[in-house]
Amino acid sequence: MTDILTDIDVAALDAEARRILELNDRGGYTVPTDGLYPYQWNWDSAFAGLGFAAVNNDRAWTEVETLFSGQWDNGMVPHILFHRPDPGYFPGPDVWGTEDAVGRGACAVASSGISQPPVAASLAWRIYRADPAAGADRLRALFPKLLAYHRWIMAARAETGAVVITHPWEAGRDNAPDWDEAMAGVDPVGVQPYTRRDTGHVDPRMRPTKEDYDRYIWLVQFGRDRKWDEAAIAAESPFRVADPTMSFTTLRSTRDLAAMAEVLGEDAGEIRNWVARLEEGAETLWNPGIGAYDAKNLRTGNFAGSLSNASFLCWWAGLRDDRAVPALDALLARSPFALPSHDPEGPKFDHLRYWRGPVWGVMNYLAGNGMEEAGLAEQADRVRADTARLIAENGFAEYFSPIDGTPAGGATFTWTAAVWLAWASPSAIRGQKKD
């Protein structure tokens, strides 16, 4: 991969990535990028911790610890923590209305009412392994909180073994075609008037449509009206989708949680039972029609028929499934840059519209590392090299066109900088080989 970057000033890119982490640091937590995302996001923050681990291990742990300062009494870790007021963001804490939510308890941090892909355990485990001596006490303090988070996931979201989402935002892949059928079942009647803020920061053609947003806000109001009661939402909501991203990140994080338990001398029996159940659930997401893993609408039983970057998180989850290799190889062959968030040959592909086509560095990190662990060295090298080339040639954007590399979404993006420092940079590769 280093041959691809022979004309690139790697040291300057490393320095810029470190500068972005500092730029977006709000004292104990980072924002994804200024303006567009002014709060602490769940999986963004875990990736920020991974990036900080390359330069400041203490700051890396603080990032994750601050994320868990917003954990609810029932174990849920929200997808947004509203540490400071910012009237420029919608929907803010007043719209979410979680003050008296079921299961929230006395948490002092205002938050949303949903979660996000639980990568925290996996990335905290990597932070620990980077410096076990410095992280031992902090891992021990964090472990019961991670355990409670996973216990909540298994109780509230894993009724089929696969992990479900109750809102597209929860998957982190907001407007992916995976949810189109389920979203069509949401009639946004009664949505209160609102003004979007995201399109004031980013070209609207790179963001979800108004039709999508109306349904997003309807689902927020639906959850708020039920005081974020998981049982009521599960019983009554028209939107409940088993998601590859949530399922595979949960499975991997659960495996890593078991590894933590062993290091800490804790009983891992319950965790291993979760692993077995999640493995069974993952099989329910195998769609032979596309030769890959797929989202499933639990209200209809239908697969989405969507070949996406999430389809290839199976190896990150620890599954050794050769069935998915042909679909991966075919997707790589028809994608100038890997991995697109939706198949470029699909009728719903849009190379610049958020999760309907663009490449995301964090998804490449998860998928590429999983491929490498599964022995898919050629494919892993391709994903890593493309990620490095996109960043080196186009900057630390939120996401990129898989067709021509056009940077899109927010700029000076925290998790893109983190992925560079931890994985994509030739400096990171040299450090890993040395270790």
Image (cartoon, rainbow, N blue to C red):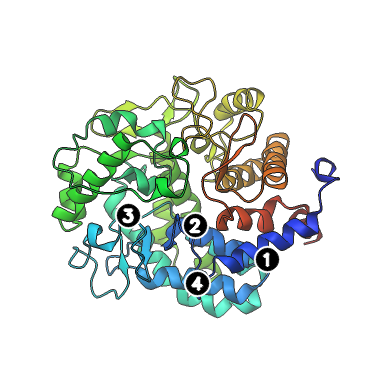
Q: Nearer the viewer, mark 2 or mark 3?
A: 3
Q: Sequence order check: which comes first, mark 4 or mark 3?
A: 4
- Identified by mark 1, the residue type is Ala
Tell me if mark 3 has few (under 14), some (14-19) or many (20+) residues whose alpha carbon lies within 10 angstroms of its own: some
CB within 8 Å, label 4 to label 1: no
Q: Nearer the viewer, mark 4 or mark 3?
A: 3
- Identified by mark 3, the residue type is Phe
Separation of marks 2 and 4 at Cα, in angstroms: 14 Å
Q: Nearer the viewer, mark 4 or mark 1?
A: 4
Separation of marks 2 and 3 at Cα, in angstroms: 18 Å
- Residue at image point 27% right, 58% down: 113
Residue placed under numbered mark 1 in the picture: 54
SS assignment at label 4: loop
SS assignment at label 2: helix
Residue 193 falls left or right of residue 176: left
Residue placed under numbered mark 3 in the picture: 90
- Identified by mark 4, the residue type is Arg
Q: Sequence order check: which comes first, mark 2 or mark 3?
A: 2
Residue placed under numbered mark 4 in the picture: 26
- Identified by mark 2, the residue type is Asp
Q: Position of residue 319 (x, y in %)?
A: 53, 41
Q: Sequence order check: which comes first, mark 1 or mark 3?
A: 1
Residue placed under numbered mark 2 in the picture: 44
Q: Position of residue 364 (x, y in %)?
A: 60, 43
Residue 143 falls left or right of residue 394: left
- Residue at image point 60% right, 32% down: 402
